[in-house]
Image: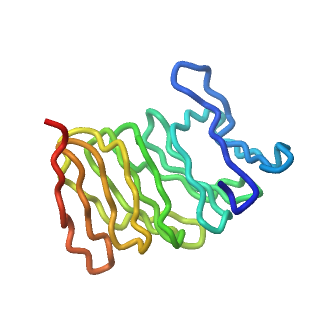
Amino acid sequence: FVGRDRIAVAPWQRGTTPSPVVAKVFDVSSGDQVAVVTDPGGTARVVDIDVSPDGTTLVAVHAESGQLQLYGLPSGKQLDAVRSHGGAVLDVAFSGDGRRVATGGVDGLARTWDVTRGKLRESVTLRGHTKPVGSVSFDRTGIRLATLGQPGARVWDVSPAGRGEVLTLPGPE
């Protein structure tokens, strides 16, 4: 959701022809399309998006390239793009305050990124999974990050004084 009355949708799916469209934003009440976010490179293969809590920024991750892109809303203007992982990025999430983004990738890493004035800066790399990290999620405070990969799930302290991993939960036996 983008604010209270809009929703952003990433239209590309694996196996379909790439499109320059990263996301479309719709008004929930009317169903009208109110914005389109496009990749300046012209071939978006976006597998996940998230929108900042204040609805002003959209983050997108690309299927194969490991690229993480930041866009302003409602303009759709690309603000920044960085290579975030050594392969595909599987999940992306904003923190509750919108000042950080987390990513999980096929490289078995999770990363957090500071978002400052429309720029992404890597802040923490989390190692511990031996297989792809398919899900990342901040707690409400933004101090902890849960990651799901192999082996199992992990909870990390990603605060500025971060202690690293604080809990490991085993996967299915």
In front of the other: 43 or 151: 151
| Residue at 26%, 64% in the rendered image | 156
Above or below, comparing residue 144 to residue 20 in the picture: below
| Residue at 20%, 46% in the rendered image | 152
Above or below, comparing residue 158 to residue 151 in the picture: below
In front of the other: 107 or 27: 27
Q: Is residue 137 left or right of residue 164?
A: right
Q: Is residue 8 left or right of residue 82?
A: right
Above or below, comparing residue 116 to residue 106 in the picture: below
What residue occupies the far left of the structure in this picture? 173
| Residue at 77%, 56% in the rendered image | 75
User: Which image quarter holds the C terminus?
Assistant: top left
- Using the rendered image of the protein, determine whether residue 40 is visible from the camera's viewpoint: no
Q: Give the tally of numbered discs.
A: 0
What residue occupies the far bottom of the structure in this picture? 161
User: Which image quarter holds the N terminus?
Assistant: bottom right
| Residue at 15%, 47% in the rendered image | 170
- Using the rendered image of the protein, determine whether residue 103 is visible from the camera's viewpoint: yes
- Tell me residue 135's x, y (percent): 37, 47
- Tell me residue 102's x, y (percent): 41, 58
In front of the other: 94 or 80: 94
Q: Is residue 144 left or right of residue 142?
A: left
- Tell me residue 74's x, y (percent): 76, 58
Q: How was the colour assigned to the protein in this rendering? A: rainbow
- Tell me residue 118's x, y (percent): 59, 66
Quarter residue 172 falls in: top left
